[in-house]
Image (cartoon, rainbow, N blue to C red):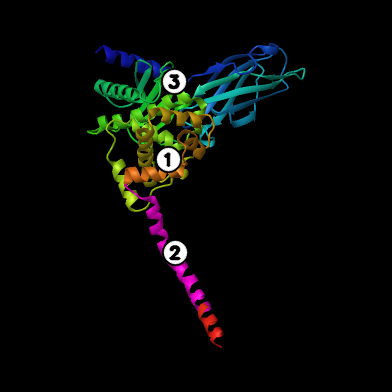
Amino acid sequence: MKLARALIFVTLAYALGWARQVHSSALNAPAGQGGVTFERVEAVYRFGGQVDFLAVILSPSPLQSASITVFDHRLNVLRSEPLTVNPDGASQFILDARQTNMRAFTLVYWRYDLVLGDGAAFQSEFFSFRYDDNRFDWQELEEGGLRLRWTQGDEAFAQNMLGAARAGLDAIGQYFPVDLAQPVDLFIYASQADMQFPGYDSWVVGVAEPSSNVALAVIEPGDQQTELMGWRIPHELMHVMMYRYLGEGYDHTPAWLREGFATLVEANPTPEYDNALSSAAARDALIPFVDLCASFPVQADSAFVAYAQARSFVAFLRDTFGVTKLVDLATAYADGMACDSGVELVYGLTLTQLEADWRQSALGQDVANTALQATFPYLVLLCVMLVIPLALGLNAMRQKTRK
């Protein structure tokens, strides 16, 4: 009952405060410079709709001009527009989130640029908010650096989620330090349809936004929900912990390595990985790892094969060379090594050579023999094309000799 009361209290507080959240970050000139001050700065929004950027801008003299610039979490410009500032200092800028690349659950920054009455230019500090999904009345449970939020489910559901998260962190600790100095927000959706955001593929059932300390997962109610928690929650938490260890260099790591690490910490991983891998191998439909460096395929079936390959390949590297070298590989990529150069630096082999060894070890494939079988018909054709002219030439030479 104590937990239930706490959940109700946190849910109400969260629902009341969510729509109006703003933080300022002194990345530039502080407010108040040149006599300009900013009051009641905020971003008010409904997820998936418009965002209202509000501020009262007080200047000692009338402004010649004003503008607002909105940035994404990497400080790429989303929109830059002139801004009207009323005589009392009130200003409002409305941005339609559907017409930008504003990604769910990431930080959005904005800044004001002013030209004062005397012609002096003034640039405000950056303000920011995290573009969280506020369409739902989320329930919340926080414990030990984990903040769990979900829309459907009782107290037992919450405890199962917490157990899956703890187990996932224990598994992650075999590879990377578990860093909970900043809380991780884990959002659980009850259906895949609820998590269909711009920029996400339609088949996605879990996503991490590591730079925002956020992990998302779909856990459909039903008999399989415990298994789904064990698969999806650790998977997304691995992305967050890997980012915290590698820093911004995490974005430079190959997709096959990031997803390989994430699949390795899934509890009781689905046998569909092995089935997909065997089927693709039998159909000669495996994807070369050089094609899985930047990203995975967007088609659901091909993407699942890519996940299966990544899991098997990274497990092969771990079992063959050890965990330390596997982490060294991630670090090398985070330091800027190219996809093939990283494995050459750490393992002394090319990615193609490692892939051949993996195919032999994990799938029993003799890559050299398979390549020979695949090219045999062309070799036969080449021989025919060479032998016939050669035979005709020799015959002509014989006839000329007789004469």
- The stretch in magenta equals 364-393
Residue at the image position 29 percent from the left and 13 percent from the top: 5
Q: Is residue 62 magenta?
A: no
Decide: is 143 above or below 269. above
Can you give x and y, in whole percent of width and height, for residue 245 in the image?
A: 45, 23
Identify the amino acid type marked 1. Answer: Asp
Can you give x and y, in whole percent of width and height, for residue 26 in the image?
A: 59, 16
Can you give x and y, in whole percent of width and height, for residue 322 in the image?
A: 37, 30
Q: Secondary structure at mark 1?
A: loop
Q: Main secondary structure of the magenta part?
A: helix
Q: Write down the residue under mark 2.
A: 379
Sequence-earlier tag: 3 or 1: 3
Identify the amino acid type marked 2. Answer: Leu
Q: Is residue 375 left or right of residue 171?
A: right
Q: Nearer the viewer, residue 49 or 110?
A: 110
Q: Nearer the viewer, residue 274 or 347?
A: 347
Q: Secondary structure at mark 3?
A: loop
Cα distance in 3D space between marks 3 and 2? 68 Å
**The label number, if any, that marks residue 201 in the structure image:** 1
Q: Nearer the viewer, mark 3 or mark 2?
A: 2
